[in-house]
Amino acid sequence: MNTAPTTEDRVWAVLSHLSALAFGMGILLPIIGWAEQRRKSKYASFQCLQALGYQSLGYTVWLLSILLIVLLLFFFVIFAAGMTAGNETTSAGISAVFGIILGFIMVGLLGIYFLLPIIAAIACGMGKDFRYPIMGNKLAKYLGYAQADNDPEWLVQDHEERWVAAMGHLTVIVFLWGILAPLTAWMLRDKQSLFLKFQSVQTVAYQAFATLLYTGAGVIYMFGFTIFLGLTGFEGNSNGSITSTSMLGLVFLVVTMIIAMLIILIMPLLHILGQWAGYRVLKGDDYHYPLVGRLVENWMVNRTQLTAEEGGSSEKGKKS
């Protein structure tokens, strides 16, 4: 690519990178930019796909890093508290230091996460070919993107679509807003790519199921807590003894809490499966989620057959 990016190219690149500041809600913008510019500007297409990768793969790495640090600090505090057992002042001091260190780490990591797309936006606004650390060069090689006179005119289409599909799978870890990535890819590439359409549709179904499951856990717990308050807050003896109604409310609360916790424990497994799906797609597989993939495939086949039948009936009607 030996021509300087146009103003439109730079605008799409800047907006795609800055959308990371919306922290999940802006993830649809890089896909829109890629779909709009993929056969107009290779520079803008690459920057949009790179921004998409940062908001999905980069967010996953950022979140997992925070969780790992929290766990390490937590075990350190437990160990330190055990070593200072019996000294409440020292234990309280350790807990305070833990809170301060954790706060600084989270603010620092959040600052780094936001700083990189700002730097990317500034660089692209100046027309430079920005690359995110580690990911940028690997993605450029994967997509067949380079600044050279003999560079192919466009990015590798199959790899473009696989990257978009894979990033859609990875966004399962972004609660609620992650579904915007596969949903936008489905809407914009519905008729252009059967592979991307299938991957996006099944990802939307999978993430919708995961979101409903997670939300359902909260609803179940709140329902049990409400019943508990209703039975124990308005019933009971004045002497403070436990009534049968109060006991029923407590049992109901415990049961709903157990159900909610079991659902919550399933969520990491769903996230891991989403990450695995993204990896498989990047490796070249036409990945199918268990059960969901088969249902979506049957739905698409039936829809295609129905469309073909309707088209045939319309042609017969015109001839007659």
Image (spheres, grey):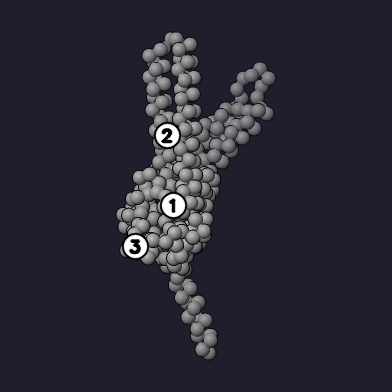
Q: Is residue 65 left or right of residue 28?
A: left
Residue 67, labelled with which disc? 2
Residue 128, labelled with which disc? 1
Q: Earlier in the sequence, mark 3 or mark 1?
A: 1
Q: Earlier in the sequence, mark 2 or mark 3?
A: 2
Residue at figure coordinates x 45%, y 17% from the top left = 94
The quarter in which the N terminus is drawn is: bottom left
Amino acid beneath label 2 = Leu
| Relative image position of residue 115 (x, y in whole percent) | 48, 40
Residue 177 versus residue 226 in the image, above or below: below
Q: Is residue 25 left or right of residue 137?
A: right
Count neighbours of disc 3 (C-alpha within 10 A) and say few if under 14, some if 14 to 19, many if 20 or more: few
Q: Is residue 291 left or right of residue 242?
A: left
Q: Earlier in the sequence, mark 2 or mark 1?
A: 2
Q: Nearer the viewer, mark 2 or mark 1?
A: 1
Residue at figure coordinates x 61%, y 25% from the top left = 243
Residue bearing the label numbered 3: 149
Residue at figure coordinates x 48%, y 51% from the top left = 126
Q: Is residue 151 left or right of residue 56?
A: left
